[in-house]
Amino acid sequence: MKLQGKTALVTGGARGLGRAYALRLASLGADVAIVDLNLDGAAEFGEHLGAPSVAAEIEQLGRRSLGIQADLTRRDDAFRAVEAARAALGRIDILVNNAGGAITPAERSHASATPEEDTRLLMDVNFMSTVHCCQAVAPLMKAQGGGVIVNISSQSGITTYNQGLLAVYAAAKAAVTHYTRYLAAELGPHGIRANCLAPGVMLTARVAAQAAARGIGTDAEAAKVPLRRLGQVEDCAGVLEFLATDLSQYVTGQVVSVCGGAVLTPS
C-alpha cells in the first residue's frame, strides 16, 4: 500500500470532498485524523455515510482515526487540533487543508460591494485557516525530516467567473495558491513538498442540494465544461493520491486544476 505506515490530517473532512480525501488516504494505508467545525456535517445535505462518522468509516478500513472538532480560523484551535492528531497518531506525514468554502450570500459577493464582514470571514475561513494549519504542522514535519502538504484551492482562484461574483472567495483561494508556492520554496530543503489541488464544480451532496434549491439544472452547468460533465469527488481524490504519495516525489509548488477543462472557458 502506497501510504502504509503514514499518518494524515484532513481538515474539513466530515463530508463531501474532505471525506473523499480522507477515505482515499485511508484506502492507501494511512491512519487519518479528521478535523471539522461540525463532525456531523454530512447530515446537513443528506450525504450517506457507511458508518456513524467519517472516522468510523476509516476504522472500518482497518486504519486508525479520530475526529477533532475545531474552528481553524482561530490560531489556538488549529494548533490544538494538530497537536491532538499528532498525540493520537504519533506523527503527521500528510496535511490536507480542505476546510473552506464560498459561505456568504452570492448576491452580495461582487468585487465592488462585498461587505467588510463577509470579506473578513471569507479570508479567515479560506486563507487563514490554511495558514494556521501549515504553521502548526511545519515544525513537526521539519523534525521528522519530511512531509507532504496539499492545500485545496479552487479554479475560482485561477481565473475570473460569474461577472464579478464570489470575488473575495476567489481572492482568498488565489492567496492559498501563492502562499503554497512560498511554502514549497521555504520547506523544500527540509524534504517537505507543498502543492495545491484546485477543484472545479464537484457534484457533492451540498452542490446538488444548493443547485436544486436555486432551480439550477446540473445538465446546464455540465454543458459549460469541455468534458461535458461535472466533477465527482473521486476525480479530486485521484489527484490527491498523486500529490500525497511518491508518485509526485519531484513535484512541489504546483497547482493542479481538476475541473474538466472549465478553467479554459470561463463564463
Image (cartoon, helix red, strand yellow):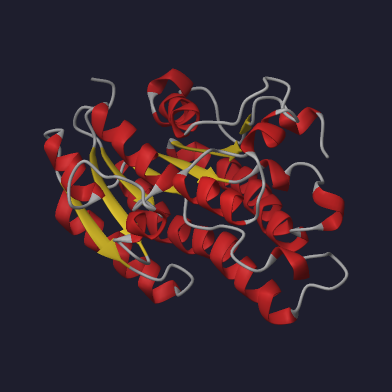
Tell which of 166 and 191 is nearer to you. Answer: 166
Instruction: Name the quadrant containing residue 201.
Output: top right
* Horizontal relation, residue 112 to residue 138: left or right: right
Which residue lies at the image location 38% right of the left edge and 54% below the top edge?
A: 137
The answer to whether residue 91 shows anywhere in this view is no
Specify the quadrant that holds the C terminus: top right
Instruction: Name the quadrant containing residue 105.
Output: bottom right
The answer to whether residue 208 shows anywhere in this view is yes
Count of marks placed on residues: 0
Which residue lies at the image location 49% right of the left edge and 51% below the top edge?
A: 206
Tell which of 42 and 172 is nearer to you. Answer: 42
The image shows residue 242, relative to residue 143, as above or below, that is above
Which residue lies at the image location 71% right of the left edge and 46% below the top edge?
A: 156
The spot of residue 133 in percent (x, y) is: 44, 59
Residue furthest front as drawn: 215
The spot of residue 164 in percent (x, y) is: 85, 56
Tell which of 60 and 93 is nearer to you. Answer: 60
The spot of residue 55 in percent (x, y) is: 21, 49
* Horizontal relation, residue 18 to residue 257: left or right: left
The image shows residue 72, relative to residue 5, as above or below, that is below
The spot of residue 116 in percent (x, y) is: 73, 80
Specify the quadrant that holds the N terminus: top left
* Horizontal relation, residue 98 to residue 114: left or right: left
* Horizontal relation, residue 84 to residue 44: left or right: left
